[in-house]
């Protein structure tokens, strides 16, 4: 035994560097699983554990899971994100047992501020398993007011159109561009240009690719023709992350100023002021980012002497203020105008009374043009009760030549009692468009007075059959009716309803109502006998019948 000891020591000595080298060669596959784990589990089955280490970044029940991974010093060679991504703002789940999500804002914060330099610093590949993750279509476009603003600034119409189009291309923020900005310098990003396969379908497709030799391509950083071929029918694409040589690198630098946590509050405020000094058309492209920044600026940060001075400089900038407000009041979309005016107030350019008067002015202008509608009522109701707004609308509307249910609904949203009554009368006897406005209003301000609800239900039941009656019935569905007289009227209307839509709408009301005052057995028999058959299978009427049978 002793004579063999030196050779054993030599063998171990030679093996040690190889073992260390092998350990260094182990790749880390980070997964962010906010929906199904199919893609992650497929990769785990095929990638040998002695060469690939898997780390799930999501910690259930912990909202700061990404920050936790940063503190733990995780460094990813590969990142796999699995989740729905239809709206382009966040990866999310449709599973009731999970609440985790991943906002793109959070990815941008990590990417821009380098508050987590390790996690993404050595990425070679990113796999985005979600719909439209690399869709090239812009999420927003240059609107006509941008060109009008540039003409006001002295450009010719042709020049204004060219500049407006260029701004739209640079700031389009398609999902593709946004992901390239987030994963800057990553050699390969895989994603989908349109609808992506669900995990239960993506898993087997990934399995076929890995089984046929694809496992050897993972973490190389090189786009795989085989993987793209496997997913070609579902629109998988591969792109590199943004580089400093890219034409839109400057846009990313601007965007990162809003997310970089290393910057002092005063520095960020000064940067925002710099943006606000630019042409109004370009400021419009930064509206989302400036809004987010303004809502995250804490009172403590505002109170710092340097920050307070920087905010005072913005408030005192009359030239930037005038450009901004002129652009806002010329906006084609009411929602954009409202957002910009609200931001102007937060920047110190308007008082609360100024903001209220501007909203009233917008409402009256749109009412005079005949363009006031449900979207405007939605904006008014979101503001909450504001009697002063109702009075301001009344004051500005006195000389107006036309009146409308939409204008009454705006006033009702602010707390006007007569506006409320006007909307309810429209629900009972107005046109289809008026009923649509009433629907929007009642989603925010449901009827709570029992006698009022009884009168409206009776009136809707007596409306002539047609689309307007169906919409009115749908508006009632959100109310939990319990009045025996109202329920009896609706139950009697069911056999007389001339359309399946009307019967479904009545069923939608009854299924939410307290039907204890009715004979449930008789009601179920009436529904079974007189219901119109559904061409597309079981519907709300069937659900109601089953519930009545079970409780009678």
Image (cartoon, helix red, strand yellow):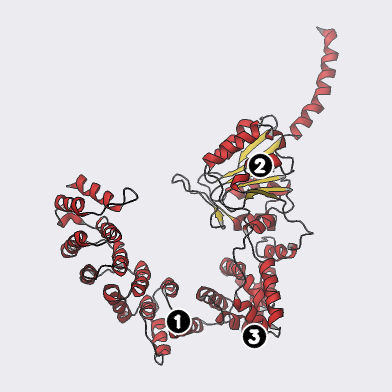
Residue 387 image point, x, y percent = 38, 81
Residue 191 image point, x, y percent = 63, 49
Image: 131 above or below 405 = above
For mark 1, give the secondary structure.
helix
Q: How many marks?
A: 3
Residue positioned 30% across, 65% down in the render: 470
Disc 1 or 3, which lies upstream in sequence?
3
Disc 2 or 3, which lies upstream in sequence?
2
The label shown at residue 229 is 2
Residue 228 image point, x, y percent = 66, 43
Front-most of residues 528 and 59: 528
User: Marks 2 and 3, how far apart in space?
Assistant: 57 Å
Residue positioned 48% across, 82% down in the render: 362
Disc 1 or 2, which lies upstream in sequence?
2
The label shown at residue 318 is 3
Residue positioned 41% across, 85% down in the render: 393
Front-most of residues 496 and 290: 496
Identify the residue under disc 1.
363
Q: Which quarter of the rendered picture does the N terminus lie within? A: top right
Q: Nearer the viewer, mark 1 or mark 3?
A: 1
């Amino acid at each position: 035994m002793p004579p063999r000891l030196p050779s054993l020591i030599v063998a171990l000595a030679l093996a040690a560097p190889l073992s260390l080298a092998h350990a260094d060669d182990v790749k880390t596959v980070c997964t962010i699983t906010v929906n199904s784990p199919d893609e992650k589990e497929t990769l785990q089955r095929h990638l040998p554990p002695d060469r690939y280490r898997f780390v799930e970044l999501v910690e259930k029940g912990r909202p700061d899971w990404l920050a936790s991974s940063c503190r733990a010093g995780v460094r990813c060679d590969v990142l796999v994100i699995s989740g729905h991504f239809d709206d382009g703002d966040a990866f999310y789940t449709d599973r009731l047992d999970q609440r985790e999500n991943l906002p793109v804002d959070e990815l941008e914060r990590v990417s821009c501020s380098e508050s987590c330099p390790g996690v993404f610093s050595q990425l070679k590949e990113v796999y985005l398993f979600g719909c439209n993750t690399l869709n090239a279509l812009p999420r927003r476009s240059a609107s006509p007011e941008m060109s009008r603003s540039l003409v006001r600034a002295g450009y010719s119409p042709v020049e204004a159109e060219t500049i407006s189009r260029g701004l739209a291309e640079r700031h389009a923020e398609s999902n593709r561009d946004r992901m390239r900005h987030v994963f800057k310098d990553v050699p390969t990003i895989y994603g989908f240009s349109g609808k992506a396969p669900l995990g239960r379908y993506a898993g087997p497709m990934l399995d076929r690719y890995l089984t046929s030799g694809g496992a050897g391509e993972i973490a190389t950083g090189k786009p795989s023709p085989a993987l793209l071929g496997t997913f070609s029918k579902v629109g998988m694409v591969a792109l590199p992350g943004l580089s400093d040589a890219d034409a839109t690198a400057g846009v990313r630098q601007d965007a990162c100023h809003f997310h970089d946590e290393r910057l002092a509050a005063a520095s960020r405020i000064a940067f925002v002021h710099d943006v606000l000094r630019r042409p109004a058309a370009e400021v419009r492209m930064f509206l989302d980012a400036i809004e987010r920044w303004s809502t995250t600026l804490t009172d403590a940060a505002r109170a710092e002497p340097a920050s307070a001075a920087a905010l005072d400089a913005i408030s005192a900038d009359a030239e930037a203020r005038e450009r901004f407000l002129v652009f806002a009041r010329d906006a084609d979309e009411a929602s954009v105008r409202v957002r910009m005016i609200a931001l102007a107030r937060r920047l110190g350019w308007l008082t609360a009374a100024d903001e209220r008067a501007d909203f009233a002015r917008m409402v009256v202008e749109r009412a005079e043009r005949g363009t006031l509608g449900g979207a405007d009522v939605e904006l008014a109701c979101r503001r909450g009760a504001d009697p002063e707004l109702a009075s301001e609308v009344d004051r500005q509307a006195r000389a107006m030549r036309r009146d409308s249910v939409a204008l009454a609904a705006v006033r009702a949203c602010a707390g006007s009692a007569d506006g409320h009554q006007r909307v309810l009368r429209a629900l009972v006897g107005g046109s289809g468009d008026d009923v649509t406005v009433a629907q929007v209003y009642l989603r925010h301000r449901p009827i709570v007075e029992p006698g009022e609800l009884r009168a409206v239900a009776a009136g809707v039941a007596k409306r002539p059959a047609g689309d307007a009656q169906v919409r009115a019935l749908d508006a009632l569905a959100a109310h939990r009716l319990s009045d025996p007289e109202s329920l009896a009227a609706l139950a009697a209307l069911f056999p007389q309803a001339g359309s399946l839509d009307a019967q479904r709408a009545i069923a939608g009301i009854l299924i939410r109502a307290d039907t204890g005052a009715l004979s449930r057995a008789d009601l179920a028999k009436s529904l079974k006998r007189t219901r119109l058959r559904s061409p597309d299978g079981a519907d709300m009427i069937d659900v109601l019948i089953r519930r009545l049978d079970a409780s009678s």
